[in-house]
Image (cartoon, grey):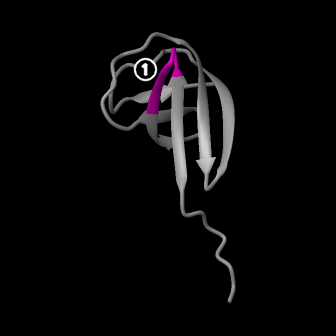
């Protein structure tokens, strides 16, 4: 039986100022928070990408912070 090359569990989490927020989409220069959140000022953050049991942490900077729910959040 051939094995599949896709992953069954993928998660994206943003951690900023001690807050842990679920991320629905991520691209080259931005992301979208899934669910409610309060505005957060600009600053350093960590984007955690979880694929099955593997976790990668990426240090990013949010120049405009998080403006609120369902809004594009830019990073670099």
Residue at 54%, 53% in the rendered image: 10
- Is residue 20 shown left or right of residue 50? left
Residue 50, position in %: x, y?
60, 46
58, above or below 7, in the image: above
- Answer with left or right where residue 53 lies relative to residue 38: right
Q: Quadrant of the C terminus?
A: top right
**Rendered location of residue 51, percent (x, y):** 62, 52
Please identify the dominant SS of the magenta region.
strand
Q: Which residues are magenta?
A: 16-21
User: Is residue 64 in view from this perspective?
Assistant: yes
Q: Nearer the viewer, residue 27 or 24?
A: 24
Q: Which residue is located at x 53 percent, y 41 percent?
A: 12
Residue 56 vs residue 39, the one in the foreground: 56
Label 1 packing within 10 angstroms: few (<14), some (14-19), many (20+): many
- Quadrant position of residue 2: bottom right
Q: Quadrant of the N terminus?
A: bottom right
In the rendered view, tell whether residue 45 sits above or below residue 13: above
**Circle count:** 1
Q: Position of residue 17 (x, y in %)?
A: 51, 14
Query: Most extreme residue toward the front, as rendered?
Result: 53
Percent x, y of residue 62: 55, 19
What residue is pinned by disc 1? Answer: 66
Question: Do we see residue 28 in this rendering?
Answer: no
Is 3 situated above or below 5? below
Give the residue at x 68% y 79%.
3
Q: Secondary structure at mark 1?
A: loop
Question: Does residue 76 belong to the magenta stretch?
Answer: no
Q: Nearer the viewer, residue 19 or 25?
A: 19
């Amino acid at each position: 039986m051939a094995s599949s090359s896709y992953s069954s569990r993928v998660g994206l989490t943003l951690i900023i100022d001690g807050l842990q927020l679920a991320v629905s989409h991520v691209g080259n220069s931005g992301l979208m928070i899934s669910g409610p959140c309060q505005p957060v000022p600009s600053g350093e953050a960590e984007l955690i990408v979880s694929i099955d049991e593997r976790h990668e942490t990426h240090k990013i900077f949010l120049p405009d912070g998080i403006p609120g729910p369902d809004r594009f959040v830019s990073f670099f």
